[in-house]
Each structure stands twice: as C-alpha cells, then as structure tokens.
Amino acid sequence: MTTPPRSITLRFLAAPTEVATLGGAVQGGRILEWIDKAAYACAVGWSGSYCVTAYVGNIKFTRSIESGHLVEVEARLVHTGRSSMHIQCTVSSADPRTGQFTEASNCLIIFVAVDDSGKPTTVPPWKPVTATDHAESEEAVMRIGLRADIEEAMSKQSYTDAGTAPESLTRFLAAPTDVNWGGKTHGGTVMRWIDEAAYLCGTSWNGTPCVSVYAGGVRFYRPIQIGHVVEVDARLLHTGAQTMHISVHVRSGDPRTREMNLTTHCLTVVAAVDDDGAATAVRQWVPQSGEDRNLDAHARELIALRDRARIGALA
C-alpha cells in the first residue's frame, strides 16, 4: 500500500480583497482561513476521510503579509492519535519580484477524521523517522497536556452581566458562501469572525488600529449550520503595555427557535499600532468587579501557560 503524503503546500497571491480594514496588510483572520484550508487538505490526504477542525493552538503572527505578495502555506503532519491528526502549519510570504520567502505565522492545528455518520474514525498511524520528525512529534505530545491545562482554565471562567469590561458583539446569518465541504460553516471562516471581533473590541477600546499577534485555545465544540444566526462576543480581559488580551465566544442557533449554543471559544491577543503601523501604547483598563478581576487573573494565567510551553519547546 502506498503511504499517503504527510504534507502539502498551498501557493497563491495575496489579493487586495484580503487586506485589513486599515492599512495594506492582510487580515489575521484571512491567514487563519488559509491555515485551516491547508491543514484540511493535509488531514484528508493522510486519512482518506472527511475531517473536521477540532482545535487550533499557539497561533503566532510574527509579521504582516502585503497585498500582492506571494504566499506559501505549508501543512505538515507531526503526530497521529486514534482519529486525530496534529498538523504544523507555517505561512510564509515573498515579494514576487525577489522570491525570497520569510515566515509570517505558524501554529498547530488538530483535525479529526469522521465517517459518513459524523463519528470519529481511525486514521493511519504516522511514525517519526528523522530527528526533526521526532522533535516535532514530541512537541505535539507535550502540547496535549498543556492544551488540557488551558481548556481547564478557560472552562472555569464566568462571563456574565457582572463584568464591566469593554466588549463588542456582532450578529449575522451564516451565509451559503461560508459553507465547507461537509455542508457546515468552514472552521477557517469562524476563525476569521473571531479575529474580526477581537479587532473591533481592541480598536474600540484603544481608539487606534490593532493587529493580531497571537491566538490560542481555539476549541470547536459544535458545527455552525448554514442559515443559522451567529453571535460573536469579544470581551477585553487584560491590557499590557502595547497589547490587549481578548476572550471571544461564538454562539449560533436556529433563527426559528432563538436558542443559542456555544460553538467556539478562544483567547486572542492584539497589539495597538499607530497610523504608520508602529507599535503604540495601550490605554490601560482597570478591573472593577470581582468577575473582572477573575478574568484579568485568568489572562495572566494563560500568559504563564504559554511561557511554560515556550520553555518546554526549547528544552
């Protein structure tokens, strides 16, 4: 039997329609869509089954991508579970006049293979061969425990009317153009909505443009049906010198019943920039209520968990 390919690289030009609302750089949400599509192609190619996005973690945006630049999105399988595939994604771009690619973003994304009834199904196991393979697989395994810690920390938090933090809410219908190959809303599209909501929250609070620098703990709980009402709620949790930590919840429901269910939750970090794109100071937010203080402490806990992961990866 032929071994299925464990990697794929998408290559295309960044279009003018993909730039951020302010400035000439591509939206972080668009980059997340690219990552999800490349990882999906990698997962389906390896498993031979339809796959769904289960989790995206440690998304780092290290530099901007300009409209008209050539983009490469590499998705590479680094670990397999019974039905899951851990895929490392790297986004690079280059001025087509030079062809010199530089990394712009990377993350780990987990897909689960499902059968025709939507139940998880087994995938071919992948065994590391080279020293690099072993290192990447070991880091993916290390992040399983870290992911459990992050999910536990996030699940303990309460988001109620007792909170006084700045927040933004968008509401719309999941459109037919948002559909994926399984008839539901594309996971990458949901991540774009999250990025847009975080941008709105951060920009509204600070009065300046902002750019995504990190997103993590993106957990997909259930699919979003086309035609359902979608609410994306972004709330400021913590401010740093130049960054804002924002929690985003996505809910959806049948407009006939108006019952909304949580579909996705994550934490996004955006940095404030001036009109020239340089980092600038953030207006500090001071927690007022007990819930505010708990969520501020929660954001600090997640920072510590990310630092632990970075140290673990370097060890």
Image (cartoon, rainbow, N blue to C red):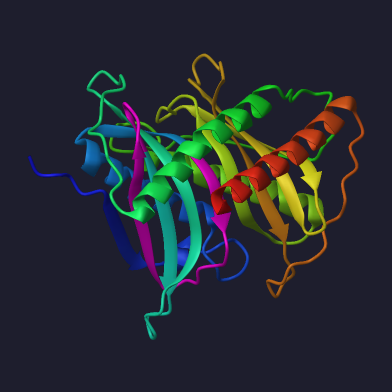
Residue 145, above or below 76: above
Q: Nearer the viewer, residue 211 or 241?
A: 241
| Image coords of residue 47 (percent x, y) | 23, 36
Report if residue 94 lies within the magenta region: no
Q: Main secondary structure of the magenta part?
A: strand
Q: Nearer the viewer, residue 250 or 314?
A: 314
> In the rendered structure, which segment of residues is drawn in magenta?
56-85
Residue 205, above or below 83: below
Q: Residue at x 36, y 64 (%)?
A: 72
Q: Is residue 185 left or right of residue 130?
A: right
| Image coords of residue 152 (percent x, y) | 63, 25
Whether residue 189 is visible, yes or no, is: no
Q: Residue at x 57, y 67 (%)?
A: 63
| Image coords of residue 263 (percent x, y) | 52, 27
Task: Locate the N terminus by quadrant.
Answer: top left
Q: Residue furthest left?
A: 1
Report if residue 65 lies within the magenta region: yes
Q: Is residue 277 left or right of residue 52?
A: right
Whether residue 132 is visible, yes or no, is: yes
Q: Residue furthest bottom?
A: 97
| Image coords of residue 173 (percent x, y) | 49, 34
Q: Is residue 301 left or right of residue 211?
A: right
Give the number of marks: 0
Q: Residue at x 46, y 27 (%)?
A: 228
Residue 200, above or below 67: above
